[in-house]
Image (spheres, rainbow, N blue to C red):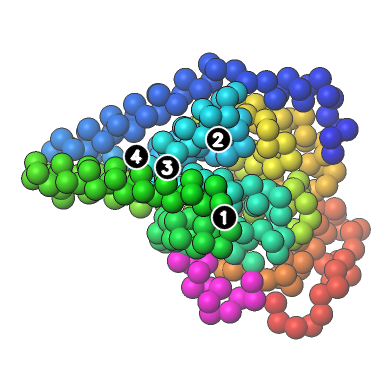
Amino acid sequence: MANSIDKAELKALYQHRWQPNLKIPLFYGIWIGLGIIAWHAPHWTIVWLCYLAMGYMQMGIVTFMHDCTHSVLFKAKWKNWAFGVFTMIPLVISFTAFKEDHLLHHRFNRSAKDPDAFTMGKRGIGDHILFYAYAVIGVVLTAVQFVIIFPIQKLRGAKALAHWSEIALHAVVTVSIFEWASSQGIATEVFALWFWPLIFFGFFNSVRFVAEHYGTPWNAGQLAGTRTIISNPMNSWFWNNINYHIGHHVYPAVPWYNLQKLHVLMLPEINRQNAIVDKSYCAVFFDAMINGPESLKRNIVRNGKRNAATAGPDAPSASNSSSVNNESV
């Protein structure tokens, strides 16, 4: 894969530029502005529209944090760490835990060791409950995963200390804010301004998360095991090109503002490997909700049919292109 792109072109895409990151204060300004409007809005419809928009903006802000996990948002590593920790404060999740999980996800993408591959299972009752619960209350499950489960299972030594220090920071900040709000008699309003946008953020994050890998070939590598979504230009802009996800998985050191250019350079290889490029987050998410959690057999059948349809009428049938038996899928 590395040889399919000119080295000079790829090197140019790795270069950091500070100008695109001016979107960071812009996004925070929009997010805060929406909160101010919600606080003073004369009608509940305006309030809830602001909450929805705040959750959408928070998803965009979190994609900046995502680049910090790969140390590519800023040149200096400490700046990536500092901004990552700061971004996670409203989510009450440690950047340390998320980063460690995310790097493991990249290393073991769409395999049994991928910590994010919970959509793949045996389609039992537990698999269905977890799958649909994530779609509805993903932000709650994410908090439990990164605050408690993953750190206890995986973090040791300095990383564990960093994680629990972040959780202590979150506790201090949260308690301080709500003690002040209570003293001013506005605790309920402050809670609503924090909680409801976070719920909407969780839904947007679930849509994005599911769409990035659901239904892609299992254990097939970074390129084939990832989906790029050619979303509308507005969504690409607000979510900082995270939808060009194949390029990110193959070349995670390329900053967010170069992912569209990377996608163009990778198109010949993407087409050669018949990797999945879709047009809509909603279409992929609705398909996932209709079909439910994955199983290996279902994954092989679905991708076999897709490959046959893409290759044309002369391609081998799905049943001949895999070793699926007659068990229920």
Quadrant housing residue 73: top right
Which circle's residue, 1 or 4, is located before the other in the chain? 4
The answer to whether residue 88 is seen in the rendering is: yes
What is the magenta segment's predominant secondary structure?
helix
Secondary structure found at label 2: helix
Q: Which residues are magenta?
A: 121-133
**Three-letter amino acid code of the residue under disc 4:** Met
Nearer to us: label 4 or label 3: 3
Which circle's residue, 2 or 4, is located before the other in the chain? 4
Q: Which residue is at 68% across, 71% downward?
A: 295
Drawn side of residue 140 relative to residue 4, left or right: left
Query: Label 3: few (<14), some or many (≥20) within 10 Å?
Result: some
Drawn side of residue 251 relative to residue 102, left or right: right
State the residue position of label 2.
68
State the residue position of label 3.
88
State the residue position of label 1.
156
Q: Quadrant of the N terminus?
A: top right
Query: Label 2: few (<14), some or many (≥20) within 10 Å?
Result: many
**Three-letter amino acid code of the residue under disc 2:** Cys
Between the C-alphas of marks 2 and 4, the distance is 21 Å
Q: Which residue is at 71% across, 82% downward?
A: 328
